[in-house]
Image (tube, grey):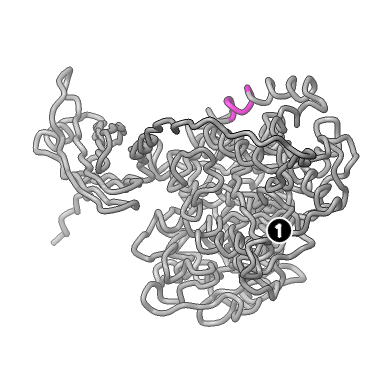
Amino acid sequence: MATPEAAHVLRRTLLAGTAVAALGAGALAAQDAQAAFSLNRCQGASGVVGRGASFQNTLHSRFKTFFETSNGCNGSPTGPTYTSTGSGDGRAAMGAGGGDLSLRAGERLATVSFAAADEAPTPAQVKLMNDGPTANTADDGVVHTIPIATGASAFILHVPEGCSISAVTNKTNAADGAYNGATTGDRADNFTQRVRVTNRLIEAAFGGDSSAATWGQIVPSISGTPTGIPSGDQTNVGVASCANVPVRRIVRQDSSGTTYGWKAYLNLIAPSRRWTGDVYGATNTRWPAAGGSGVGTVVAAATGTDCTGTDRLCSPTARGGGALARLVASTDGSIGYVDLATARSNGFEVTPAASEAAKDYTYWSPLEVMSGSRAGSYAEPTVFATSHVAGGDKGAACATAPISAGPAASADPTLGDWSNAYAAGGDAYPACVVTYALAWDDNAPVYGNTADEEAKARTVKDYLSLIVSDAGQTFLLTSDYSALPTQTQTWARTGVDAINWNKSTTVVDPPRENPPVVNPPVVNPPVVNPPAPAPVSNSFSIPSSKTAPTLLTFTVQLPGAGALKATATTKVGKKNVNAGSATGSVRGAGRVTLRIKLSSAAKKALARAKSKKITVKVAFTYTPTGGTAKTVTKNVTVRAAKKPAKRKAAKR
C-alpha cells in the first residue's frame, strides 16, 4: 500500500512520464529570453566540474546520464562530473573559505563551475564568495543559492549480531509498520522485522546520554548473546548480553550538510541541547561527549575509526556519506545517518532470510512522526512503505515536507538568506533535507571573459535548468530523492533563469563624423513616487507539537517581530467549548514555544470520553509588527493518562 504522498507522486510520475517523452530536447527550452550568451542551448562545453555535498552524489551521477539523453543535450555536450567531498568543500570552492581545500577566504577554485551544499552559505560566506580574492571590484561576482531537491536522511543501524528482537515490542510489522497505516510487509517468519527507536532515545543516543548508552536502553527487550560480525568486528564478543552492548555513534568528521540536516531533526526533539547553535552546530564537526549535555564536546575528526573509546563516537577518515555507511556496516552495534540513496547503495535494505542466523542486521529504520494527527506513529523515509526491502521502488518521502526559516519572497529569493532553512519536522517523515546548487549569476567577472568559460557557464545553466524542470523534478524520484515544494520550484527556476554571461557588457555605437550640435529640449523629469514598501511577511509554521493530559506544547516558527495568540477548542456533543488559550510576543524572527493549559471543561470532556481521547482544535493567530494578521489551525489528539495497575493485597 502506498502512502498518500506516494499516490501524489504516482500521479506526478504518470503525467510527467508523458511530459518527458513529449518534451524531448524541449525540456530546457524557454530559459533565455534575455540571455547575453553568444552560445545557444546545448552549445556549451563538456568536462564541466561540480563539487560539494555528498547528499547529492547519487543525484548528480544519475542526472549526468539523464542530461545526456534527449531530455537534456543528447550527449553533446556531456554532463558535468561531480566530486562528492561535503558541503563545506562546496562552499569553500566558491570562495567561502574553510573546508579541506586550503583556500583563503574569497579565493575560488577555478576548476569548479558550480558547487553543492545541504547547509546553505551564511550571508557572511556569501559576501566572501561575491567579493572574491582581491580588493578590486572587477572580479566581484553574485552567487545564487538554488534549491534543487529534497531528500531523506536515513537512520541506519547495525544491530549487534547474534541478538534477537523477538521479544521487542517497538518493531515493524506487516499490520501497522508505516505512516497512515500502510503495510511494511515486515514479518517474523522471514526475519524482515526491524527495530524502531523513539525520537527521544535517538536524540539521547547521539547526545551521548547515559540513558541511551546501551542497546538494551534504546531497544528494550533485545535478548541473546552477541557473536560479533563473522570474519569482522569482534569487539562485542564477551559482552555478557545483547542488552549490555554499547551504542556506538558514527558521525561525519567533515563540515557536512548531511550532518546539518540530521542535527536540525535532533534539535526539534531537544532544542535545549542547542544542536544547531554555537555548541554543536558550528561547522557541524562537534558532538556531545559521553554523559550528555554540559559534559563537553568531542571533535569527530579526532576520534578515528575505533568506537571503543569512552565517548563511543567515531568517524570515517574518508569524506562523504558513503564512508560513514561503510563504517556502520563494519562496526557491530553502531548507529549513523546518511542520505537515503547512499543508504540503499551501501546495502542498508532488508533481505528476507530463512533463519535467525542468516537474518539481516544492517538496515534503515522508520522514524517517529513529530506532529499532526499521526504523531507518535512511524514513517518510512521512502515513498512506498515496502521500499526498504532489497529491490524496492525508489523515492524519498519528502516532497510534501515544509521548508521552514527560508528567505522572504522577493524578485529572486535565490539571492536571499537560506542559511537557517530546514525541512525537518512536519507531520510525516521528520528527517527531510533541502539541498542546493551554488552557481554564479555571471561567470565572466569571476573566472575571466573567455570563450572557454562562457562554454562552461552555458552547460551549467542547461544542466541546472534540467534539474529544476518538471521532467527533472519527477526524475528525482527514481534517484531516491524527492521534488521541491511547488513554490520553491518556482523560486529555483527564477534563480537558474538569471544565470547569464558577461552581463556588464554595453553596446556603444561608433561616433559619427562632424555630428551636428543639437540642443536637447528642456524636459522636466517626471515625478516618480517611490514604490510602496514590501508587505511585512505573516507566513509562519508550527513544526512540532506535544500533548499531555493537561498541557499542549507547540513550537512556532515566526518570520519576525509581532504578537502570537493561540485559542483551543474541543467538541462536547455538538457544542464547541473553550479548551484553553495562550499569548506571546517576539522581538524578531525565530522559534517560540507556546504552552496551553487545558481548561476545566476540556479536562472534564477528556475524563468522560469513552475512547479516552479528545480532538482539540487550536487556532494560531500571528500579527506581525506593521503587518496584517494570519491564522493557522492545527488539530491535535489529547489522550487521558493511563491509570496505574491496582496492586493485589499481600497475603497474611
Image quadrant containing the N terminus: top right
Reply above or below: 582 against 241. above
Q: Which region of the structure is painted magenta?
A: 6-11
| In-image side of 459 versus 106 (left or right) | right
| In-image side of 379 versus 187 (left or right) | left
Q: Of 237 and 411, which appears nearest the observer? A: 411
Q: Is residue 8 magenta?
A: yes
Q: Main secondary structure of the magenta part?
A: helix
Reply above or below: 302 against 43. below
Q: Is residue 601 magenta?
A: no
Q: Position of residue 252 (x, y in %)?
A: 61, 67
Q: Quadrant of residue 320?
A: bottom right
Q: Position of residue 300 (x, y in %)?
A: 57, 75
Q: Position of residue 251 (x, y in %)?
A: 59, 67
Q: Where does label 1 land, which residue? A: 446
Looking at the image, which residue is at 64% across and 25% down? 12
Amino acid at dot 1: Val
Q: Quadrant of residue 636?
A: top left
Looking at the image, which residue is at 24% across and 35% down? 612
Residue 373 shows in this picture: no
Looking at the image, which residue is at 51% across and 60% down? 122
Q: Quadrant of residue 273?
A: bottom left
Count residues near mark 1 (Cα–Cα under 10 Å), then give few for <14, some for 14-19, many for 20+.
many
Residue 365 shows in this picture: yes
